[in-house]
Amino acid sequence: VRLLDSQLQDQYILQCPHVVHGIDFSADGSLLATIGQDELVLFSTENGQVTGRLDLDNTGTTLQFSDAGKWLAFGGNGDLLGIWNWTDSEESIKLPSVSGTRHMAISPDDTLLASGHTDGIVRLWELQSAKLLGELAGHRGELRGLQFSRDGRTLISVATDRQSRIWSVPQQRCLGVLDDEILAISPNERQLVIGYHQPDTALPATFIQSIDQRALGFH
């Protein structure tokens, strides 16, 4: 893994012991986490040194730091799904998973974890207790993207069925479905970047669309 500065010059070459399938920075930028074959590794971005390791029982494909930096959620093939309080523990908490995990998101207040799976289900977890709160079903393909709204009350999911679903987190119900893939949400939550496939070509296209915040559950 090459860590570059703002002038795109190499700061460090991080020697990972595995093929890297996922990376994430901590909120303060002081750490970089990588996940891959049977291992999760933490690097200091200040000096490029390894600051922590976690052995995994399967290949990891996705990981996510919490905003406060205390928690690191991870998932991958098989039933690999867990959370790690890397600040004071060498052991992770395993979450019961029945299918591979492809994406995850942690709510802005660090209370909830959403995990997206190969069976098309989004699962909601209480981060502190690792308790399963509910399952959001509706997608007909494996999950490829999740994002919470700023207040944590709305969740957007994107899957390989080329649909985006907007969920109420408190009510655990679908508020709406878009037959396009939401690629990003603007910081003020007033615009979406949409990806779609044009009818006469296999190539995807993107456009920016203004949204009705209330219609999509944003407040």
Image (cartoon, rainbow, N blue to C red):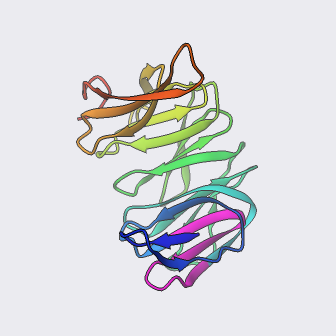
Q: In the image, is residue 1 above or below residue 59?
A: below
Asked if residue 120 can be seen in this view, the reply is yes
Q: Is residue 82 left or right of residue 129?
A: right
Rendered location of residue 45, percent (x, y): 46, 78
Q: Which image quadrant: the C terminus?
A: top left
Q: Nearer the viewer, residue 190 or 47?
A: 47
Total of numbered circles in the picture? 0
Q: Residue at x 37, y 34 (%)?
A: 193
Q: Is residue 45 left or right of residue 187?
A: right
- In magenta segment, residue 15: no
Q: Residue at x 46, y 27 (%)?
A: 205
Q: In the image, is residue 212 above or below residue 219?
A: above
Q: In the image, is residue 131 above or below residue 34?
A: above
Rendered location of residue 56, percent (x, y): 72, 66
Q: Nearer the viewer, residue 134 or 4?
A: 4
- In magenta segment, residue 42: yes
The magenta stretch is 32-52
Q: Which image quadrant: the N terminus?
A: bottom right
Asked if residue 90 can be seen in this view, the reply is no
Magenta: main secondary structure equals strand
Q: Quadrant of residue 30?
A: bottom left
